[in-house]
Image (tube, helix red, strand yellow):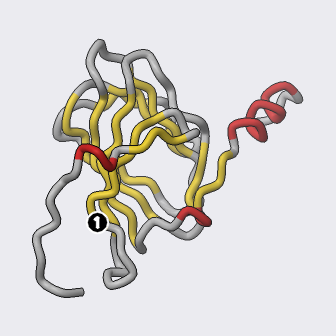
């Protein structure tokens, strides 16, 4: 990694099938240890159930209010300043329970790569229909 300042580019924000907007703030091949993204979830929206293969993730809540679900933990309300720790390979989703956008940093170690993302929404839906957890 080299010393530099990476400035946010609001035009780089992308809508993801996960049901949120992502702006990659730092994610490059010259810094394999970590990535940082700004995530935004609209009011009333719940992201899809997903997990990251072999990547730990932390959410740092910057704005709004959410309800986070991780693994088998009971759903937990989160707000400004809270840090959510998500182990590798752990199912997760977050809901915006407020009336403004829920905004948080998603910090991944090692850095996020798209191939690590696993959408498990449909898998969990089928399990619930069959009476599993």
Query: Which quadrant: the C terminus?
Result: top right
Between 50 and 13, the residue placed more toward the observer is 13
Q: Is residue 75 above or below residue 43?
A: below
Q: Which residue is mark 1?
A: 26
- Would you say 12 lies left or right of 10 here? right
Query: Which quadrant: the N terminus?
Result: bottom left
Residue lying at the far right of the rendered structure: 130
Question: In terms of image quadrants, where is residue 90?
Answer: bottom right
Residue in the picture at 33% in, 59% down: 107
x, y (%) of residue 103?
A: 27, 35
Residue lying at the far front of the rendered structure: 11
Residue 83 visible (yes or no): no
x, y (%) of residue 3?
A: 12, 83
Residue in the picture at 56% in, 59% down: 52
Q: Is residue 88 above or below residue 2?
A: above
Q: Is residue 31 above or below residue 85?
A: below
Between 9 and 130, the residue placed more toward the observer is 9
Residue in the picture at 84% in, 25% down: 129
Question: In terms of image quadrants, where is residue 63?
Answer: top left
Between 108 and 82, the residue placed more toward the observer is 108
Residue in the picture at 25% in, 40% down: 61
């Amino acid at each position: 990694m080299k010393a530099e300042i990476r400035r946010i580019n609001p035009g780089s924000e992308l809508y993801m099938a996960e049901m949120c907007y992502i702006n990659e703030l730092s994610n490059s091949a010259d810094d394999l240890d970590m990535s940082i993204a700004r995530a935004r979830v609209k009011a009333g929206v719940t992201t899809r159930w997903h997990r990251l293969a072999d990547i730990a993730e932390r959410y740092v809540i910057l704005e709004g209010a959410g309800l986070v679900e991780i693994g088998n933990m009971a759903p937990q309300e989160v707000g400004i300043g809270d840090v959510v720790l998500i182990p590798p390979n752990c199912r997760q989703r977050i809901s915006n329970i407020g009336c403004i956008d829920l905004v948080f940093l998603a910090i991944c170690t090692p850095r996020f790569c798209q191939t690590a993302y696993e959408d498990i929404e449909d898998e969990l839906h089928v399990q619930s229909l069959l009476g599993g957890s």
